[in-house]
């Protein structure tokens, strides 16, 4: 992509409304535009990041055996009356009526709808276990939308729903999602720490929140520092095998949100020097809720002996759009964003330090073509901006590899390559750059 043809509305000033660094940087880097409180348009740079995050979430859900579908954003109020949540949900639910005065709502979550789909088709234990998920926009009329995409009103969530014959099966489904979440956040360069959590309006009796530690996070958390260094299960993890050793390892060290924190236990279990009390961002949450929805909504299957069994369910959410902010909170410096490679909007950027110079132009064009030919998603800053401005833009938008093409080094057959993550610089020939990135 040539920057001269891209749509990258960079802001020079710090937007006044942005209280935290990720919100500030997303606005400044031209990723996002607020359309109403808590409602955002994702501009091209932001949209590329959002899609990368979504794809990682999808790949790890699929790897764990969940099946993707897509449910609508609008739901019938009557469905929510069946579970009793239409009244219970309160003012966070956006209620709408159509021209026939039929009551609808913009879905804040999908337990009711997926249970309705399940009960319509699945009649036998033979079709279990089943885990269905979608990645869809949600609406919650948050009392205080703030911090940009961290607490939006409209936001993108991955939500998965598992169906099993009994509690033991549901726990296996829960463990799969637990492991999938460990991998998902790690692939984005984050430490998403599972912590015991309250079940809230979803209900149920077993839950973990996945928390990224950050001072700007809205949740108070307590944990054993050692939990930060536990190993992430590899891609080869056998989801059909016994996952309990992994779960045991992660849950035997103390980690809890403030809602369920037990001070006495914390002090008894964790030596003082390992006690960590800080704040964090909730990037995901998993629930086992048994028959909370299947019972009132009559999601029953025939068991092996022919008798009807009420299925046991769980639900598993990831804040896909919130993650864009959470990653920036974890990966930035004073100059801007430092994208981990897996979610970067472009992998590399070429900075032509003398636009209009015949040597630099020719070298940049060649490098640009060669990198594209190798399948590298590269941005070419071919604008008329001065070198200093190009450095600032590249640092702000956080592309992992910056390739600086200036007349002096080019005379010696070299370009300068800077890695954004650590600021390290090295001189390389264009051919070596292509070999390194391609
Ligand atoms: P929070 O405690 O931040 O309000 P929640 O517990 O209400 O979140 P869940 O119902 O657990 O949210 O939804 C699953 C995930 O969706 C959350 O872990 C979070 O990452 C994301 N999420 C929830 N609310 C928002 C929001 N208003 N804006 C962006 N992401 C959100
Ligand atoms: Mg909430
Ligand atoms: Mg929460
Ligand atoms: Mg939650």
Image (cartoon, helix red, strand yellow):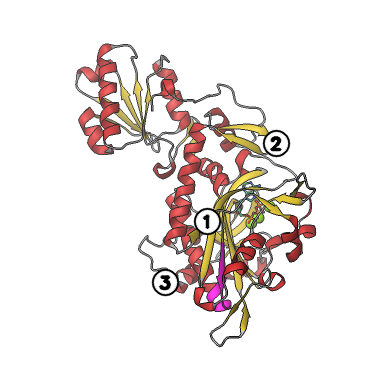
Q: Which residues are magenta?
A: 161-170
Residue positioned most to the bottom: 305
Of discs 1 and 3, which sits in the foreground?
Answer: 1
| Residue at x-position 59% and y-position 63% | 315
Camera-side residue of 78 and 321: 78
In the rendered structure, does residue 163 fall within the stretch colored magenta?
A: yes
Q: Badge 3 local density, few (<14 within 10 Å), some, or many (20+)?
A: few
**Residue 169 within the magenta-colored segment of the rendering:** yes
Given residues 366 and 429, the one toward you in this image is 366
C-alpha gap between disc 1 and disc 3: 22 Å
On the picture, is 297 further left or further right than 44?
Answer: right
Instruction: Kindly identify which numbered label has been placed on residue 37.
Output: 2
Residue named by callout 1: 69
- Which quarter of the rendered picture does the N terminus lie within? top left
Q: Circle 2: is it few (<14), some (14-19), or many (20+) Cα within 10 Å?
A: some
First in sequence: mark 3 vs mark 2:
2
Q: Secondary structure at mark 2?
A: loop
Ligand 4: image quarter: bottom right
């Amino acid at each position: 992509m040539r920057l001269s043809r891209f749509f990258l509305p960079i802001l020079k000033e710090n937007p006044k409304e942005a209280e935290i660094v990720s919100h500030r940087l997303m606005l400044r880097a031209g990723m996002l535009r607020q359309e109403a409180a808590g409602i955002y348009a994702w501009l091209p740079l932001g949209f590329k990041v959002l899609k990368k995050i979504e794809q990682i979430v999808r790949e790890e859900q699929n790897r764990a055996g969940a099946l993707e579908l897509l449910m609508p954003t609008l739901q019938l109020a009557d469905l929510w009356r069946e579970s009793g949540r239409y009244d219970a949900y309160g003012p966070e639910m956006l209620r709408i009526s159509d021209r026939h005065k039929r009551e609808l709502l913009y879905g804040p979550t999908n337990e009711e709808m997926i249970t309705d789909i399940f009960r319509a088709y699945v009649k036998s234990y033979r079709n279990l276990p089943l885990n269905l998920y979608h990645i869809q926009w949600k609406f919650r009329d948050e009392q205080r939308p703030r911090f940009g995409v961290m607490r939006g009103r409209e936001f993108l969530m991955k939500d998965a729903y598992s169906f099993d014959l009994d509690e033991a099966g549901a726990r296996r489904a829960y463990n799969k999602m637990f492991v999938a979440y460990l991998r998902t956040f790690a692939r984005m360069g984050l430490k998403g720490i599972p912590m015991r959590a309250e079940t809230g309006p979803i209900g149920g009796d077993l839950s973990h929140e996945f928390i990224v530690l950050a001072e700007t996070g809205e949740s108070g958390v307590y944990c054993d520092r050692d939990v930060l260094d536990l190993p992430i299960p590899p891609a080869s993890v056998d989801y059909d095998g016994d996952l309990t050793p992994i779960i045991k390892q992660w849950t035997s060290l103390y980690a809890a949100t403030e809602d369920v924190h037990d001070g006495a236990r914390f002090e008894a279990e964790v030596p003082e020097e390992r006690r960590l009390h800080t704040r964090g961002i909730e990037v995901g949450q998993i629930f086992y809720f048994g028959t909370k929805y299947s019972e009132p909504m009559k999601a029953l299957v025939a068991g092996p002996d022919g008798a009807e069994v009420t299925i046991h369910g769980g639900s598993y959410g990831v804040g896909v759009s919130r993650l864009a902010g959470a990653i920036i909170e974890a990966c930035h410096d004073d100059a801007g964003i430092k994208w981990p490679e897996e979610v970067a909007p472009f992998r590399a950027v070429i900075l032509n330090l003398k636009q209009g110079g015949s040597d630099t132009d020719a070298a940049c064009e060649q490098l640009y073509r060669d990198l594209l030919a190798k399948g590298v998603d590269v941005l070419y800053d071919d604008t008329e901006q001065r070198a200093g401005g190009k450095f600032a833009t590249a640092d702000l938008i956080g592309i992992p590899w910056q390739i600086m093409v200036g007349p002096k080094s080019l005379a010696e057959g070299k370009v300068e390559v800077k890695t954004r993550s650590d600021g390290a610089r090295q001189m390389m020939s264009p051919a070596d750059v292509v070999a390194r990135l391609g």
